[in-house]
Amino acid sequence: MRARARSIALGRNELSFYGQNGYLVVERFIPEKECRSLIAGAQGIAAGRHANLLNIHERSPLFRRLLVHPGILKAADAIQKARMIPIGSIFFFCKPGNPLEKGANAHQDNYAAKAPYGSYFVCGVALDDADEGNGALVVYPGTHKLRDLPYTPAKNFEMDRHGKIVKAYPIGPAVRVPVAFKPLQLKYTRGSLIFIHGHLVHSAPQNPSRTRWRHKVYLHYIKDGDPFWPGWNARRRLIERDARPPRADDDDDH
């Protein structure tokens, strides 16, 4: 299900689809020029070391502005039927053949936030066209209704004493999906938003392409007033959504 490009006021059909399936794709919401600027900003921070970047909004005003984007917040509020508060971000480079990224197991994001059911919410921002050929997201529609599934704890990263990722594992502790729920390979264009329920089972392979990148940033939100686990590495924390973001000319990331 795909909402109309640049739509902020989502209609009844889109909201119903999300309620039934646990995800919603909004095509081409972020302009291509902005996508390229975000990629350049992240590449500048990475300086050739393409490991996942936790809390990239703390290192770049570009991503800080994206996290509190009024259009994304308005859509998140409508989907969740609550005032959503930003709490974190993570950038994935998904470079072809990158040993520092291992894709993602079939998992639920709420394993990390440990929030009440239906409170934790993620918005993926695709900065490149993505499909099966470069490892786009795979979802299991309807699995968000299963609530918390059993899993065995597993770490995502190993870090050195400076906090840099030196080894990566597939993201998320794997869950066993009941056979009644089938995987669906998504395909989306650069600038698309993918709204994901915190309990939706989803996965992604390590980028199988030899040439195509798959830059993507995930923005994390919580219902206003609900508790969540801040995490040891992610350091999720409440971020004021209404504060005036830094000006574009304040950004010196690239």
Image (tube, rainbow, N blue to C red):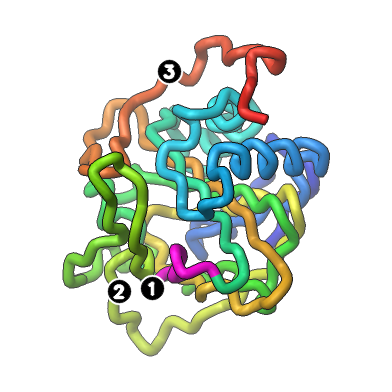
Residue labelled with disc 3: 240
Rendered-image quadrant of the N terminus: bottom right
In-front residue for pair 129/114: 129
Left-right relation of 236 to 55 = left
Left-right relation of 58 to 123 = left
Quarter residue 228 falls in: top left
Read off the magenta span: 98-105
Left-right relation of 201 to 176 = right
Q: Earlier in the sequence, mark 3 or mark 2?
A: 2
Q: Secondary structure at mark 2?
A: loop
Is 49 magenta? The answer is no
**Mark 3 → mark 1, Cα distance in angstroms:** 32 Å
Cβ–Cβ under 8 Å for marks 1 and 2: yes
Residue labelled with disc 1: 105
Seen at 67% across and 44% down, the residue is 39
The secondary structure making up most of the magenta span is loop
**Mark 3 → mark 2, Cα distance in angstroms:** 33 Å
Seen at 40% across and 68% down, the residue is 201
Residue labelled with disc 2: 174
In-front residue for pair 124/80: 124
Mark 1 is on which residue type?
Asn
Cβ–Cβ under 8 Å for marks 3 and 1: no
- Which-is-in-front pick, marks 3 and 1? 1
Mark 2 is on which residue type?
Ala
Measuring from the top left, give residue 151's x and y in whole percent. 20, 71
Left-right relation of 129 to 93 = right
Compared with 173, 121 (above or below) is above
Q: Secondary structure at mark 1?
A: strand
Compared with 80, 239 (above or below) is above
Q: Secondary structure at mark 3?
A: loop
Count of labels in the image: 3
Seen at 64% across and 36% down, the residue is 41
